[in-house]
């Protein structure tokens, strides 16, 4: 299916809609935009945040090799992350974990030593969608690449697991899964991968104080993602009374909550993708990251038909988004 464009542009659209609401209280967003949230891009171009910028960095690293070797891809990711960190356009409230890790990556040592191992922030998976779009990756490669790109900055096991699940969700939606089926597919993936540590991709990352082995390290991440999916399923089983989605599935500052809250908005608005972006942007939490993932999921499912045609030329980085989409369409 040819939905890479819809996914990447949807991600950027959600990011742009969530940019002005990220640090507002829900009541303030509702007062400014109404209870449905913002439905129109602002500005020419409509600016995005570090979420889209880092997604493009991941896309650039992936475009270099058809079948990436872990060491080569790690260096490509390092190079593109450092280019982002040094860019004058990196002025969109970038995450502290990404900045801290990039400062360490710039020293040239092993990336495992640069990673912020205590962080499971959503910076790990708000940028992972391109991994789910590469059609020739098998599931083992998708898993390894997803976790590697997360691990360079966010070394917590939940950041790794949530990144793999986010990319896997993009993959299955692009291949034709219905949005309401995704939670069950992710839950099955959690159980299947619970004790799988990707040694070839992650190397010594698991070697942290208090851990006896890689299984103990990685299982914690999958268990926390399962808990987030439990909240998602409970929210979807209940009537939708409106209001802030973060009340049900978390504020999205951490990776598993960003994934689950974005999926909540995507499933609830499967028939109104722009409404899904608006609802995701109208949150008390990390609105731009939640909305960018919502856009990635809806765009992977429905392609460019999900989005207003005039937005294509309005969004910042449109040429880069289109160029990477062509590689994987």
Image: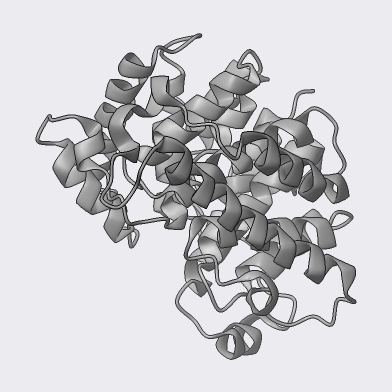
Q: 141 or 3: which is nearer to us?
A: 141
Colouring rule applied to residues: one colour
Q: Is residue 326 visible?
A: no
Number of marks present in the image shown = 0
326 versus 98 height, above or below: above
Q: Quadrant of the C terminus?
A: top right
User: Picture quarter containing residue 94?
Assistant: bottom left
x and y, in percent, of residue 67 in the image: 49, 9
x and y, in percent, of residue 294 in the image: 67, 54
60 versus 163 height, above or below: above
Outermost residue toward the top in this view: 66
Q: Quadrant of the N terminus?
A: top right
x and y, in percent, of residue 235 in the image: 79, 70
Outermost residue toward the front in this view: 212
Q: 143 or 242: which is nearer to us?
A: 143
Q: Is residue 225 visible?
A: yes
Residue lying at 83% horizontally and 62% vertically, measured from the top left: 268
x and y, in percent, of residue 28 in the image: 56, 88
Q: 226 or 325: which is nearer to us?
A: 226
Residue lying at 34% horizontally and 59% vertically, measured from the top left: 92
Residue lying at 86% horizontally and 45% vertically, measured from the top left: 181
Residue lying at 41% horizontally and 31% vertically, measured from the top left: 148
Q: On the rendered structure, is 294 left or right of 251?
A: right
């Amino acid at each position: 299916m040819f939905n890479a464009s819809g996914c990447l542009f949807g991600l950027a659209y959600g990011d742009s809609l969530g940019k002005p609401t990220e640090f507002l209280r829900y009541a303030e967003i509702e007062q400014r935009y109404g209870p449905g949230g913002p439905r129109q891009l602002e500005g020419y171009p409509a600016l995005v945040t570090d979420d889209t910028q880092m997604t493009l960095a991941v896309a650039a690293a992936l475009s270099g090799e058809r079948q990436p070797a872990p060491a080569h891809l790690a260096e490509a990711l390092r190079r593109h992350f450092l280019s982002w960190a040094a860019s004058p356009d990196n002025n969109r409230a970038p995450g502290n974990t990404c900045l801290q890790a990039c400062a360490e990556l710039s020293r040239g040592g092993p990336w495992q030593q640069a990673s912020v191992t205590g962080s499971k922030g959503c910076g790990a998976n708000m940028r992972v969608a391109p991994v789910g779009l590469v059609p020739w990756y098998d599931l083992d490669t998708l898993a390894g690449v997803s976790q590697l790109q997360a691990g360079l900055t966010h070394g917590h096991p939940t950041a790794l697991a949530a990144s793999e699940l986010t990319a896997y969700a993009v993959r299955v939606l692009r291949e034709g899964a219905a949005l309401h089926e995704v939670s069950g597919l992710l839950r099955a993936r959690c159980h299947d991968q619970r004790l799988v540590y990707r040694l070839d991709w992650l190397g010594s990352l698991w070697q942290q104080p208090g851990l006896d082995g890689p299984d103990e390290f990685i299982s914690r991440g999958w268990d926390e993602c399962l808990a987030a999916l439990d909240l998602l399923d409970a929210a979807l089983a209940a009537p939708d009374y409106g209001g802030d989605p973060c009340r049900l599935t978390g504020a999205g500052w951490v990776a598993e909550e960003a994934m689950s809250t974005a999926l909540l908005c995507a499933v609830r608005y499967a028939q109104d993708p722009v409404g899904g972006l608006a609802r995701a942007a109208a949150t008390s939490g990390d609105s731009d990251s939640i909305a960018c993932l919502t856009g990635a999921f809806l765009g992977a499912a429905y392609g460019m038909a999900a989005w207003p045609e005039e937005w294509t030329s309005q969004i910042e980085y449109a040429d880069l988004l289109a160029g990477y989409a062509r590689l994987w369409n």
